[in-house]
Amino acid sequence: MARTKGRRQHLMTAAISIFSRYGYHEAGIREIAQEAKCAVGTFYVYFTSKSDVFLALIDALYSAVMDEVMRGRKDLALAEEKLARSLDRVVGTLLQQRDLARVVLVTTLGSEPVVENHLWNIRQTFAELLATQLQECGIPSERAQIGAWAFVGALAEIFSIWARRPEQSLEAMTQGVRDLFWHAWGLRLSSTSSPPSSS
Amino acid sequence: MARTKGRRQHLMTAAISIFSRYGYHEAGIREIAQEAKCAVGTFYVYFTSKSDVFLALIDALYSAVMDEVMRGRKDLALAEEKLARSLDRVVGTLLQQRDLARVVLVTTLGSEPVVENHLWNIRQTFAELLATQLQECGIPSERAQIGAWAFVGALAEIFSIWARRPEQSLEAMTQGVRDLFWHAWGLRLSSTSSPPSSS
Amino acid sequence: MARTKGRRQHLMTAAISIFSRYGYHEAGIREIAQEAKCAVGTFYVYFTSKSDVFLALIDALYSAVMDEVMRGRKDLALAEEKLARSLDRVVGTLLQQRDLARVVLVTTLGSEPVVENHLWNIRQTFAELLATQLQECGIPSERAQIGAWAFVGALAEIFSIWARRPEQSLEAMTQGVRDLFWHAWGLRLSSTSSPPSSS
Amino acid sequence: MARTKGRRQHLMTAAISIFSRYGYHEAGIREIAQEAKCAVGTFYVYFTSKSDVFLALIDALYSAVMDEVMRGRKDLALAEEKLARSLDRVVGTLLQQRDLARVVLVTTLGSEPVVENHLWNIRQTFAELLATQLQECGIPSERAQIGAWAFVGALAEIFSIWARRPEQSLEAMTQGVRDLFWHAWGLRLSSTSSPPSSS
DNA sequence: AATGAATGAGGCTTCATTCAT
DNA sequence: CATGAATGAAGCCTCATTCAT
């Protein structure tokens, strides 16, 4: 599992492990390098700085989520169907990459301006995407906007709780959130449990 | 507003200002002291460490919120009324102390184990309180629990957004969140806009 | 015991207690003041600095020892008798004021240049006095000098040991040292156990 | 003498220099680093703290002394011979490493609990070793114990004096102490001046 | 590409001392 | 005389980053 991935990928995996264990500030490059079984200098061959890995992790999650979302929407026509599929894919991808998701959603806060800005932009992009879809389902602009934000915040909170209490079923909690919002928005269609394509 | 408060209060106000401007790690004791117009050593007369002020801030907000909530419930009988009043008071207090709330809800994350643990405990206490009230309104245990968490996460997200875009109306956003969840829980009673007692 | 002594004396007693418990650097003025049940500022009414109390303690012990030594020599004629009496008085005074002696002999080292210099001078004065007496007993100059130094060093070591192992009999140990040196110097007269006058 | 030693050795030499010049508390890591011509951070690559170097210095001296003592005793049978040789080697090693010895014997006192405890243990170990040998020479237990302590104290005092008055011959003084105690213990054998092996 | 010893700016915290009341 | 809140210089240590090998 390690030999085939490139060094860079290997370092990112190590970073996820260390960051989620210690948090952004407590985590040290030395520890990440150790976890990846290489020297500190090697880290700087693949990343320009500590924040740089973090940005890479954020982008990795973002890409994964977006890929899944986009792929899932192709063959659907109804707005509600699309929204349902989107949420499924988002949640599904986060579940599949739960360690990465935890780092990005929970650990990022309080890291560094550059990193926080980046995540902020992505969260906004995502929230806007969601808000647009909500509007397409007939929800008025302002409510859609607030709803999108609330949904993102709720998801982050769930991962934060799971980070502290791993015995809680992440699946159950995310599903609960999904249902909650689905109901809040007054949508009818039930969850279209089409699993995201395996990575 | 500053001369009459004790030095400790004065320092806490300064801390709110500095923390919300720079975040936990970037904030320095020197800056806090400067903002409070006193020497660095004076800070350590009133607080034992950087994390100590932060804990004090967290507790200050928690106390304020709890006081308001408890005071608001006295004369009410119906479970839904109580819940509505509780939410009003929570949101109301956060709005009144929005700067403090922003620091506690947004800045705390990624600070230090001691601080994060403290906030975590308080958030949990609060979420449980909310969950209990939701159950008293007839919402099944599990949904109540998830709902409480989601509500807390959503509120935090709102403050995070307001921290970045102060031009957004915090009142409108919190009200939006409140309505969203009220609807999600299928409750009837409209918001009982009894403003919290002025401090 | 406290009300009758002046504040200054009271503070010195407190200082002995604190210094012997924590050592020079770990001891704080605040702690000394607390022990003396007065405010920090009051300390600075009677002493100009931390080192100042220490100097006072050193002088107090020095005076006590010298008083006893001088008083004990009056009515003696033989050199060996005088020496014996001197040693008795020195050791006797240290035993009577063992807490003070411990602080001066053990704690002083590594304190501060001013303090160390002062103690050094006193130790030298004392060693020279002893050396002179040894020479009067017929011991050649150089051996007398070395002997005096060694004696002082040995006594200090004994107090250092007693500081760590208070269960050891300080009386027995000092007597042992006295005998050892008495023998080393080839003196005949046995110890003239005339106790020093009580203070 | 500096280029060939490793950085760690180099730093220890610098530490000896600085500590003996300023004492434990007045000595700063910055000064040690400067003396060793490296950055402060480099110091912390080789030692974990200020007390850590000090412990290393103590151990270095202790090892050197013990090595010499043990090596010198191999081919001897008589108890008195062994004792004589031991004292020679101890004194000899301290003379060879006089700067280090001065720091360890004089500067350590009043440093820090950890350091003082360590030195205390080593001094005790050494005193016990000496006491044992004295008993093997027929000196009763208690006198042997006191004698060992007194010897250690006397040696320390000598180094303390030499630290202040470098013009005094350290060789003469230590030899004087050696003779003094030899005589005090009533031993016959003269000093077996076999010099310790050169390092 | 890989290494890891070296760097040094900067942060938190302590505590002897002062001075206005 | 007594007080104790206020002061601020100074010290130890961390850790992201570099660069010669």
Image (cartoon, coloured by chain):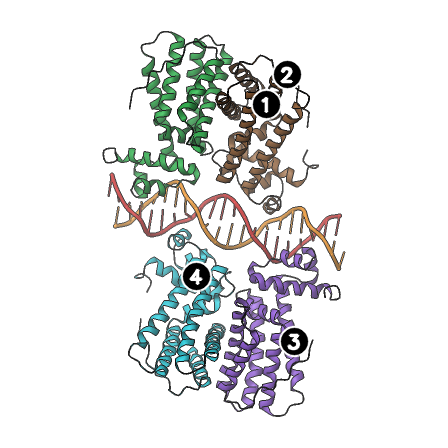
Chain colours: A green, B brown, C purple, D cyan, E red, F orange
Helix, strand or loop at mark 3: helix
Which residue matches tag 4?
D54
Mark 3 neighbour class, 10 Å CA radius: few under 14, some 14 to 19, many 20 or more: some
Tell if the residue under mark 4 belongs to the same chain as the one under mark 2: no
Which residue matches tag 2?
B192
Is B35 placed left or right of D160 in the picture? right
Q: Is residue D178 above or below residue B76?
A: below
Q: Position of residue D176 (x, y in %)?
A: 44, 82
Which residue matches tag 1?
B91
Is C35 placed left or right of C146 in the picture? right
Q: CA distance from mark 4 to mark 2?
A: 69 Å
Q: CA distance from mark 3 to mark 4?
A: 36 Å
Q: CA distance from mark 1 to mark 2?
A: 12 Å
Mark 4 neighbour class, 10 Å CA radius: few under 14, some 14 to 19, many 20 or more: many
Mark 2 neighbour class, 10 Å CA radius: few under 14, some 14 to 19, many 20 or more: few
Tell if the residue under mark 1 belongs to the same chain as the one under mark 2: yes
Q: CA distance from mark 1 to mark 3?
A: 73 Å
Can residue D19 be seen by looking at this rendering? yes
Q: Is residue B46 above or below residue B82?
A: below
Looking at the picture, which amino acid does disc 4 mark? Answer: Phe
Looking at the picture, which amino acid does disc 3 mark? Answer: Ala
Q: Is residue E21 above or below residue C131?
A: above
Looking at the picture, which amino acid does disc 1 mark? Answer: Val
Which residue matches tag 3?
C64
Q: Chain of mark 4?
A: D
Q: Quadrant of the C terminus of chain C?
A: bottom right
User: Which residue shows up at 51% across the image and 15% down it?
Assistant: B184
Is F7 placed left or right of F17 in the picture? right
Q: Chain of mark 3?
A: C
Q: Quadrant of residue B188?
A: top right
